[in-house]
Amino acid sequence: MRGRRSAAGLIALWMLASACGNQATPTHPSQTQEIPAGGLDASGSGSGGTFTLQVTKNGAGSGTVTSSPSGISCGTTCSRSFSGGATVTLTAVSASGSVFAGWSGGGCTGTGSCTVQINSNMTVTAAFNTSAPPPPPPPPSGTFTLNVTKVQNGGTGNVTSSPPGIDCGATCTANFASGTSITLFASATSGRFASWTGGPCAGSTNPSCAFTLGANTTATASFANQPLTFIESTLPDGNVGADYSAFINTTGGSGTQQHQFSLVAGSLPDGLQMQAFFGVQSTLIHGRPTRIQTSTFTVRVDDGAETATRTFTITINAAVTLAITLPGPTAKSGTLGQFYFQNLFASGGRTPYVWSVTGGALPAGLQVISASNGNRIEGTPTARGTFTFNLTVRDQDGQQATQVTTITIN
C-alpha cells in the first residue's frame, strides 16, 4: 500500500510541472528590460557607439554637400558624428558654372544621392568640375553654293579656294557640303589686291578669307592699281664743277597722263635743274654744281588722277682733283697711212675740259681735238716711230693735269 501512494505522488508532481511550462510568454517587456548599449540607432536598431562621417571635395569646380539627418553642410561643416548603424543620405548641389561629377568612397558612385550606413569612421568624396560650354549647333544639312565675284578697278587678279573648287579665273562658282571650312585666296596679276568688298570677309584687306559655309554665299574681291609712288628714296651726292645727273622714277597710279614733276618745297643745289618729265614716268635732275652745300627739297608727281610727294636731299662736296683717265701712259698704236683715233677722258675739276700737248710732239699727221662732241687725238699718221709727248687737260677753274704719253706708229 505504501508503495502505491509514493508512485501516485510522483505522477501528480510531474503533471503540475508540465502545466506551468505550457503557460504563454508575456507580450510586453517588464519594467526592468534593458536598452542595448549605445541606445537605439536612427533606423531603430541598436549597434552601439558613434562614428564620424567626413565629406571631402575635389575637382576644378565648386558646390555644396548636405546630409539627412542634418549635420553636414559642406560648404562649411564637412564632418559629423552619427550613432553606429545610422543611415545617412548625402546630396550634392553644384555651383553656377560647375557640374557635379560623382561620388567616391563609402561605397557611393554615380551622380545621384549617396546613402551610407554608419558602422565605422568613413570618408565620402564629391567631385565638382567646371561645366563645359554647350556644343555648337549642328550645321544645316545639305549642300550650298559659293560664288566669287571680282571688282577689277585698274588691277586684275585671281581667287582660288581650299578645298579646291573655286579658281576664278574661269571657275567662280562651286558647291560644297554644309559646314565645310573654306579659305579663299586672292592674288593680283596686275596692280594690287585692295580688299574684300562683299561676303563673309567684307572690309578685310587680308588676301586670305576663311569662313564656314552655312548658306549660299557670295564673296567679292576687289583689285586696284598700285598707288602712285616714287621708286627712289635717296639721290646720289655730287661734286662742285662735276657733271651731275640723277633720275627720279615713279610707279603705279590710276591716271593716264604722262607723269609731271615739280618742286613744291625747298630748292635744288646751285647749278642743278629738274625736268618737268623725262620719259613717261620719270624726271632728270642734272647740271654742274657750283658750290659746296646740302639741299633738301620735296618733289611732287601728278599722273592726272593721283598725286604723290617725296622729300630728297642732295649733298654737293668739294671739287674732285682733276686727273686724266684715258689714255694711260701708253696710247693705242697706229699704222702708217691709216686713220687713227684715240678718245680723251678726265675726271674731277669742272667741265668742260680743254686738251692740249704741252711738250714733245704727236706723230706727224695727228692732232688734238677739243669739241662738244668729244675730246680726242685723230688724223692719218705720215711717219713711223714711237712718239712721246706731254698730254695736258685744263678745267674751267684753271685746274690742270698733265701725263706723259707715248704713241707708236707701225
Image (spheres, rainbow, N blue to C red):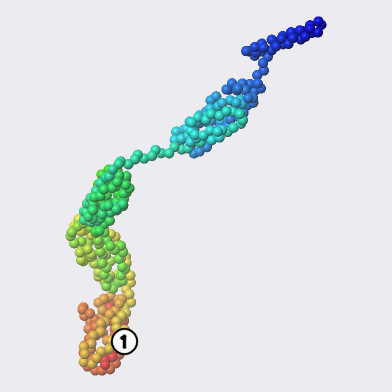
Answer left or right for 206 relative to 23: left
Q: Nearer the viewer, residue 119 or 140?
A: 119
Q: Which residue was labeled with disc 1?
A: 330
Type of amino acid under label 1? Thr
Q: In which quarter of the image is the C terminus?
A: bottom left
- Above or below residue 322? Residue 230 is above
Are there few (<14), some (14-19), or many (20+) residues within 10 Å of tag 1? few
Question: Hey, which residue is sitting farthest right in the picture?
Answer: 2
Q: Residue furthest top?
A: 1
Instruction: Residue at 23% x, 65% y: name it.
Output: 283
Question: Where residue 146 sits in the image (x, y, percent)?
Answer: 26, 47
Percent across and percent down for residue 26 are 64, 12
> What residue appears at the point 32 percent right and 48 percent down from the top-left corner?
181
Please determine whether, in this image, residue 48 is positioned above or below residue 24.
below
- Residue at the left extreme? 257
Identify the residue shown where x is 32% and y is 79%. 323
Q: What element carries label 1?
A: loop
Q: Quadrant of residue 401?
A: bottom left
Nearest the camera: 351 or 91?
Answer: 91
Residue at screen point 29% across, 60% down: 311
Classify residue 103 as left or right of residue 399.
right
Residue 211 placed where, x, y %? 31, 47
Q: In terms of depth relative to the viewer, which is nearer, 390 or 328?
A: 328
Does any portion of residue 360 appear in the rendered image? no
Q: Where is residue 140 in the image (x, y as percent from the top left)?
A: 30, 41
